[in-house]
Amino acid sequence: MKVFSLATILLCSSTAMAHFSLDYPSSRGFIGANEPLAPCGGFIAVTNRTQFPLSKGFLEINSHHAAADLTINIVFGNDPAAMDFTTAATTPASSISLKHPGNACLPLDLSTFKNATNNVNATIQVVYNGGDSPLYQCADVVIVSNATGFDQSKCINDLPTGTGAPTPTKSSSAAGALSATGTLSTVVAAIFMAAVMTF
Ligand SMILES: *[C@@H]1O[C@H](CO)[C@@H](O)[C@H](O)[C@H]1NC(C)=O
Ligand SMILES: *[C@@H]1O[C@H](CO)[C@@H](O)[C@H](O)[C@H]1NC(C)=O
Ligand SMILES: *[C@@H]1O[C@H](CO)[C@@H](O)[C@H](O)[C@H]1NC(C)=O
Ligand SMILES: *[C@@H]1O[C@H](CO)[C@@H](O)[C@H](O)[C@H]1NC(C)=O
Ligand SMILES: [Cu+2]
């Protein structure tokens, strides 16, 4: 496990290096030093909306901690206030435990959410905890049933399918939220981490 903590220190000791980035759908904005600022990493204004599919959507992130716990919240509406994010966080849309650094494609299926219907505006918030402090990124979206503008090719996992890509499991939450749990073996993560470090 030493390789994990060493890697974490190496990867996060530089302020120029992101702890994590939300790469798709487009983030409201990214400033590494501001990522700890809730609710959206220092970005308050709504930006261009990415079409997000009602069912079988995903978020693509790049994680720079050896392991991290993520919570995904969804706030419906055109211009949510900070309080709306706080409210949304009481019924998270998804919880994911990542056991590897690098690219990760996080499934997010909104089809069971009461307020998610065709042409509804929403903001997706990612809360990332890699062991230092909670970090925030947001993406403004429009939920659509026929999301031709959603780029399926952005779903990238650094590890081959079957060896630890995050997999959603239904939860029995009243909000109809999904949860997902990464199942990556620490052995594979350690090998991957070593490769990153020697690179
Ligand atoms: C938003 O979209 C418009 C139209 O596609 C584009 O002109 C503009 O540059 C975009 N703004 C940002 C911040 O991406
Ligand atoms: C869903 O919509 C209803 C009615 O518009 C609203 O009262 C409720 O707060 C919404 N729920 C969420 C999670 O936004
Ligand atoms: C969704 O937001 C866009 C601007 O981002 C706005 O033009 C549109 O009217 C909104 N849709 C609804 C249903 O309010
Ligand atoms: C989805 O949208 C595309 C482009 O807007 C359209 O060509 C296609 O017919 C639509 N498909 C369905 C099933 O509505
Ligand atoms: Cu960090």
Image (tube, rainbow, N blue to C red):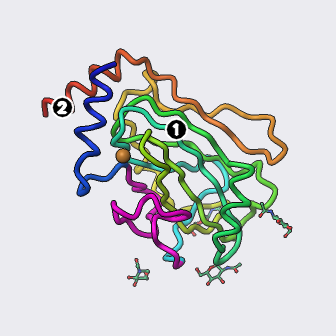
In this orientation, which residue lies closer to the viewer: 99 or 112?
99
Q: Would you place residue 106 above or below residue 30 in this image?
A: above
In this orientation, which residue lies closer to the viewer: 110 or 64?
64
Quadrant of the drawing holding the C terminus: top left
Q: Quadrant of residue 27?
A: bottom left
Residue 46, x across and y down, in percent: 54, 77
Q: Is residue 197 left or right of residue 30?
A: left
Q: Would you place residue 61 above or below residue 80 in this image?
A: above
Could you give the CA–CA distance between mark 1 and mark 2, rounded to whole angstroms?
A: 22 Å
Residue most extreme to the top: 187
Ligand 5 has an atom within 8 Å of the beta carbon of the residue at disc 1? no
Q: Would you place residue 74 above or below residue 101 in this image?
A: below
How would you rate the neighbour count of disc 2 (Cα within 10 Å): few for under 14, some for 14-19, many for 20 or more? Answer: few
How would you rate the neighbour count of disc 1 (Cα within 10 Å): few for under 14, some for 14-19, many for 20 or more? Answer: some
Q: Would you place residue 98 above or below residue 189 in this image?
A: below
In this orientation, which residue lies closer to the viewer: 154 or 103?
103
Q: Which residue occupies 33% across, 60% down?
A: 32
Q: Quadrant of residue 180?
A: top right
Q: Which residues are magenta?
A: 20-45
Give the SS element for disc 1.
Answer: strand
Identify the disc placed on residue 197: 2
Q: Quadrant of ligand 3?
A: bottom right
Residue 65, x across and y down, in percent: 36, 38
Identify the disc placed on residue 15: none
Looking at the rendered structure, the kind of residue marked 2 is Met
Residue 101, x across and y down, in percent: 35, 36
Residue that carries the numbered disc 1 in the rendered image: 69
Q: Which residue occupies 32% across, 26% down?
A: 4
Q: Is residue 148 left or right of residue 61?
A: right
